[in-house]
Amino acid sequence: MSPDVKLREVTMLAQSLLRIPSVTGHEAQVADFVRGYLQALGFEAWVNDYYTVIAVLQRGDGPVVLMDSHIDTVEADAAGWRHPPFAGEIEAGRLYGRGASDMKGALAAMLHAATTLATSSFAGVLVITGTSWEERFEGYTLGKALDELATRGIQPDYVIIGEASELNIKRGQRGRTRVFVDIQGKAAHSAHPEKGINAVYQAVPLIQRLRALPPRTDDFLGPGIIELIGLHSSPQPVDSIVPYAARLSYDLRLLPGESPSSVWARFHAEIAALAAQDPDFRANVELAQDTLVTASGRQETIVAFPPAWKLPADHPLVQKAQAALLSIGLRPQITKYDFCTNGSYSAGVARIPTIGFGPGTEASAHVTDESISLEELAQASAGYAAICRELWRR
């Protein structure tokens, strides 16, 4: 296939995907598009109850390679865009639209690579997942897809996450979660504050203790973070009442080995220390939860805790991916993601060797006039095909 033909084909495919709005929880139409595309290539493909597309092409008993892109996007306010967010317009070698970089561009490159691979000979299994709900729950629906694959006797040996990497190889990321601390005070008229317990004042020493905690760090992923991002007092609106409750909101960036129980214990230890000093100090800790609604209308409450993960630089997946990309003229750096991806499940929970490789930059995600380089789309398509061939090579 000539470079011009490849560029034209992957561009048209990306435009088609961008023209289908798929905000989180509304992925059905784009899921059907991806399923139909892969079925036409000979994949066994289906859409599950989470609006996730799962497609399998079996060609023997070689390694099982799974390539994953999420199909949902964040919202787009068209009023602020120079290029309409769902038009798929092209200007100066870049394709514009919501999801161009995060991450329908990568999805188009994977689908185009599948077109090439489906017409070639190899001994192995290719799985492609177009996962839903990632913008709210990184890794959750990929985990459900892996469960479904397991019921069919399919266990991936390698996972390639297509999140934007500037065509570099990502071998890890920090995890994340949100923690709420609810502090109980006692209401009183603000003209007689001595009769109450001001929950905001009670929060101050806890904020100070949490801020003074020694930072955790990882030699590859960098520092863990505990950052206060909100303080809400009750009652609202404020009107001559000493606040009887306060909620602190914390954003955490997690390192390998941290779990919901270890995070809870770290916060609870600081609360217990304050309670030992002040009998009026009372507080509770909880990890943030949110609700997912499936296609059948079932509601699932999920604790948001995508964990950290990292793969050694000398792991065969990293080394083979690098060799494959070098063989087609790319010069990938081996580095890490600064944001969360579905690798939190494949690597962080399921312990499947995982790398990230995709077109675009992290900084171009979720922005007005989101865009991606057309040249990178074509290079990513070639890269996905090359990595798969290298992993299947005996």
Image (cartoon, rainbow, N blue to C red):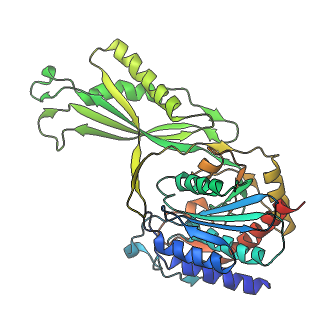
Q: As drawn, is 290 to the left or to the right of 320?
A: left
Taking depth in this image into account, of 162 and 4 the one nearest to the observer is 162
User: Vertical placement of 276 versus 330: above or below?
Assistant: above
- Where on the picture, by quarter, is residue 68? bottom right
Task: Residue at the far right: name it.
Answer: 394
Q: Give residue 368's position: percent from left, percent from top.
A: 47, 69
Question: How far across and down, in percent of the image, does residue 299 sit?
Answer: 38, 54
Residue plotted at (58% across, 52% down): 143
Whether residue 118 is situated above or below residue 354 in the rendered picture: below
**If the image is split into quadrants, where does the C terminus sit?**
bottom right
Viewer-nearest residue: 194 or 26: 26
Residue 97: in sight, yes or no? no
User: Which percent across, then down, holds residue 297?
Assistant: 37, 61
Horizontally, is 335 left or right of 323 in the view? left
Question: Residue at horizontal 50%, vertical 30%?
Answer: 261
Q: Residue at x 37, y 18 (%)?
A: 274
| Left or right for 60, reference 230 | right
User: How many numbered callouts?
Assistant: 0
Q: In percent of the image, x 62 and y 60: which residue is there?
A: 163
Instruction: Give percent across and percent down for residue 36.
Output: 59, 78
Q: Which of these two is toward me, 257 or 183?
A: 257
Quadrant for the N terminus in the image? bottom right
Does any portion of residue 160 appear in the rendered image?
Answer: yes
Q: Quadrant of residue 127?
A: bottom right
In this view, 280 is above or below 110: above
Image quarter of residue 328: bottom right
* Position above or below: 222 against 56: above
Q: Nearer the viewer, residue 323 or 214?
A: 323
